[in-house]
Image: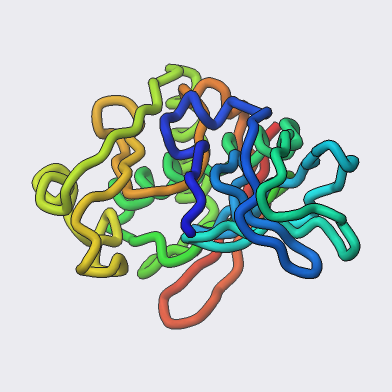
Amino acid sequence: MSTVKLYMESIDAGYSTDFCAKVTNVDTNSISLDQTLFYPLGGGQNWDVGTIEWDGGIVEVSEVQGRGQIQHFVGEDHGISIGDSVEGKIDWERRYAHMKMHTAQHLVSGLVYEMYDGARTVGNQIHTDRSRIDFNPVKFDQEMLDHLFEKANSLIETSLVVSDCIMTREQINKIMPPERTNMDLLPISVKQLRVVKIGDNLDLCPCAGTHVRNIGEIGTLEYLGKKNKGKGTTRISYSIQ
């Protein structure tokens, strides 16, 4: 049984922290719910943590995994049973950090593509205190990086709105080149996609992650360093102040 992903209902849903659900599956150290606000590991973004409370007590959610059915890892001997009604609460500080970091990744990825000859984002990892993006093909010098982060921080000050919608592959491809949205990496069987957009298509990308309502919430991006990953790939690390 698939879990309804409440955090994907809208950009605004990413700001919700509390929800009610029914337990649909129980394992030794994890449970699954009919619906959840807990974001699972995926798309480069780390999972949410928090608590799940029911009539029998309260447990800490230490990790969340899965795509269809979402597993909430709560430790052994949790005492929760199938059919139990529970109340979940996510750690807002961690969630909001991920929202800002992930939206920043979209912004920087879009800028790199436009500024540096269509360099693609080929990997990313979103954490609370620092994140990274892998680009290919590109070789950054310090002047390029200074210009990139100056441009990103200048745009952040404009507080462009971040929105989401459902689009077909064909609709997306009419707006953005497939290589910019990494459309070739998505299963061809997937016809409709949740798309996250910054402003008037400053960036438009299929994404299941959580994001802020406008880029002004991100704060100031700080460049941390770069690393050569070989074969024309460069890893850029950043934090938010």
The reply, left or right, for residue 11 in relation to residue 228 is: left
Residue 237 versus residue 164 in the image, above or below: below
Question: Which residue is situated farthest in the front direction here?
Answer: 83
Dividing the picture into quadrants, the one containing residue 228 is: bottom right
For the question of whether residue 99 can be seen, the reply is yes
Which residue is nearer to you in this view: 52 or 92? 52
Q: Position of residue 2 (x, y in %)?
A: 47, 56
Residue toward you, 238 or 64: 64
Q: What residue lies at 42% left-to-right and 34% top-to-bottom? A: 9
How many circles with numbers are drawn on the protein? 0
Quarter of the rendering containing residue 137: bottom left
- Toward the viewer: 138 or 57? 57
Which color scheme does this rendered protein use? rainbow
In-front residue for pair 28/128 = 28
For the question of whether residue 237 can be seen, the reply is: no
- Residue 138 horizontal/vertical position (percent): 39, 66
Question: Residue 19's spot in the image, x, y percent?
Answer: 64, 31
| Residue positioned 25% across, 33% down in the render | 201
Residue extending furthest bottom? 231
Q: Which residue is drawn at 74% across and 62% down?
A: 30
Left or right? Give the position of 55 relative to 191: right
Above or below: residue 111 compared with residue 138: above
Q: Which residue is rendered at x = 35% and y = 45% of the image?
A: 110
Give the percent coordinates (x, y) of residue 226: 60, 62
- 75 above or below 214? below
Asked whether, in this view, residue 194 is left or right of residue 178, the answer is right
Image quadrant occupied by the C terminus: top right
